[in-house]
């Protein structure tokens, strides 16, 4: 079998490992927040400050990681960032006060941010080796990792163990789990020569206007996703007046739909193409939010079903936004680290700012009025994403050829 094909297949397994472990770390952190809050007696304001510090550290490190990827290769960045992102779980686990936690939260965010850029940059390199869409499944695996981290935390708490001990054990074990995944990554970065790009250094010189369009599409998609994550269950409880036990199903439906489409979305994009996929992504998400908004106006027997259908459609649509954008950047060839870092930072800022902005709007008016914002931004995904991807496809270079197609 051709060595390039063997390397691509091995690296694909390694990238799956990185995405699963990164999601697992996030799942452990998120599920352990209530226990951390109780242990340090943080309260909503100080807990919110900690989350803001983590996000700030992640955003800054994302912007710094792009040039590092371009200079050192995504493989080297992944080798360092992956184990580091697991090790810094010790910060929240061992913090003895709010102020110690605040400092260590920044380190935790830095680990998350650099890992995010490194593994996404490597994923687009692997996809170029394959010559067909494979990125969406990586993001689905991240979701599965998050679910596994949350489930493990729940199990530990149910049997009466301490969540703090779980974080300490994870901080020791997870860095070693990253090592075999890192060994499987591509041995060398793709060669970005003038012969490959037709004399254009495309990936290293994407115009700021194009990066801004891609960033805006990522921002819109992430904010719409964050709105569903943080407000779907509350919408069901406050607006639809569902039973408290049934309200979380709104988020569960959204999450299951998103994860399923991410795991199965690569063949869909291969068949439809990136431009049509991003168009349908925005349309599905917009229709989904419209159904959520009109649900309270329907009959009592239909409103819950209408809203849940809307959240499912929103999950289906938003699932492919980030994989399509990242894949298009990778297809443009050249050094992708800086461009991916910028697009990732734009998207992450949407995920960070969205819940807070919606909360302020809901406080000033109502939650249905606040949810108009992600509904509009879901349409922006299509309106901005389509021309941005068309422009990138004009810059795209052929994938690294392999004699035998990769089919696994």
Image (spheres, rainbow, N blue to C red):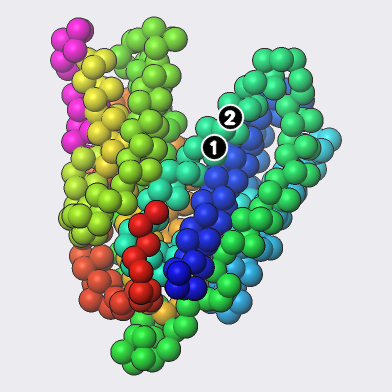
Please identify the quadrant where the N terminus is shown: bottom left
Relative to the observer, which residue lies in front, 199 or 387?
199
Percent of width and height locating residue 383: 19, 55
Q: Which residue is mark 2?
A: 150
295 magenta-colored: yes
Mark drawn on residue 353? none
Percent of width and height locating residue 232: 37, 26
- Please name the residue shown 63% across and 70% down the image: 76
Q: Look at the image and give the residue range highlighted in magenta.
A: 286-302
Relative to the observer, which residue lies in front, 332 or 363?
332
Percent of width and height locating residue 213: 30, 64
Q: Of all residues shown, which one is farthest toward the front?
A: 1
Q: Is residue 213 left or right of residue 119?
A: left
Relative to the observer, which residue lies in front, 170 or 117?
170
Mark drawn on residue 146? 1
Residue 201 showing in the rendered view: yes
Mark 1 lies on a secondary structure that is: helix
- Please name the residue shown 36% across and 91% down the image: 195
Please name the predominant secondary structure of the magenta segment in the image. Answer: helix
Q: How many other residues sit within 10 Å of disc 1, few (<14), some (14-19) or many (≥20)?
A: many
- Please name the residue shown 41% across and 70% down the image: 129
How far separated are the C-alphas under marks 2 and 1? 6 Å
Q: Quadrant of residue 45?
A: top right
Mark 2 lies on a secondary structure that is: helix
Residue 325 showing in the rendered view: no
Asked if disc 2 and disc 1 are in contact, CB closer than 8 Å, the reply is yes
């Amino acid at each position: 079998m051709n060595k390039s094909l063997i390397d691509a297949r091995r690296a694909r397994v390694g990238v799956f490992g990185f995405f699963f472990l990164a999601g697992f770390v996030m799942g452990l952190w998120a599920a352990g927040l209530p226990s951390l809050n109780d242990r340090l007696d943080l309260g909503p304001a100080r807990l919110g400050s900690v989350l803001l510090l983590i996000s700030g550290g992640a955003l800054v490190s994302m912007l710094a990681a792009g040039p590092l990827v371009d200079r050192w290769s995504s493989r080297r960045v992944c080798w360092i960032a992956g184990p580091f992102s697991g090790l810094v779980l010790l910060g929240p686990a061992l913090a003895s006060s709010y102020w110690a936690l605040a400092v260590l939260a920044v380190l935790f965010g830095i680990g998350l941010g650099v890992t995010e850029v490194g593994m996404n940059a490597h994923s687009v390199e692997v996809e170029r080796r394959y010559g067909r869409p494979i990125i969406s499944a990586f993001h689905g695996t991240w979701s599965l990792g998050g679910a596994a981290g949350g489930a493990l935390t729940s199990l530990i708490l149910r049997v009466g163990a301490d969540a703090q001990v779980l974080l300490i054990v994870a901080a020791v074990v997870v860095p070693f789990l990253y090592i075999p995944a890192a060994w499987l990554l591509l041995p060398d970065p793709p060669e970005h020569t003038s012969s490959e790009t037709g004399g254009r250094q495309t990936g290293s010189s994407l115009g700021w206007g194009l990066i801004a369009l891609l960033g805006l599409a990522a921002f819109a998609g992430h904010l719409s996703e964050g709105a569903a994550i943080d407000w779907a269950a509350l919408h069901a409880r406050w607006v639809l007046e569902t039973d408290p036990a049934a309200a979380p199903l709104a988020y569960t439906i959204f999450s299951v739909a998103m994860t399923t489409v991410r795991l199965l979305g690569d063949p869909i994009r291969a068949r439809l193409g990136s431009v049509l996929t991003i168009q349908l992504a925005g349309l599905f998400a917009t229709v989904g939010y419209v159904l959520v908004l009109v649900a309270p106006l329907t009959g009592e027997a239909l409103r819950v079903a209408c809203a849940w259908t809307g959240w499912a459609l929103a999950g289906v649509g938003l699932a492919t936004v980030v994989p399509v954008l990242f894949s298009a950047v990778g297809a443009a060839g050249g050094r992708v680290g800086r461009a991916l870092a910028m697009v990732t930072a734009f998207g992450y800022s949407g995920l960070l700012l969205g819940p807070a902005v919606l909360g302020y709007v809901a406080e000033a008016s109502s939650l249905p009025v606040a949810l108009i914002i992600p509904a509009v931004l879901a349409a922006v995904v299509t309106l901005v994403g389509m021309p941005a991807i068309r422009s990138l496809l004009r810059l795209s270079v052929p994938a690294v050829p392999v004699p035998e197609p990769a089919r696994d």
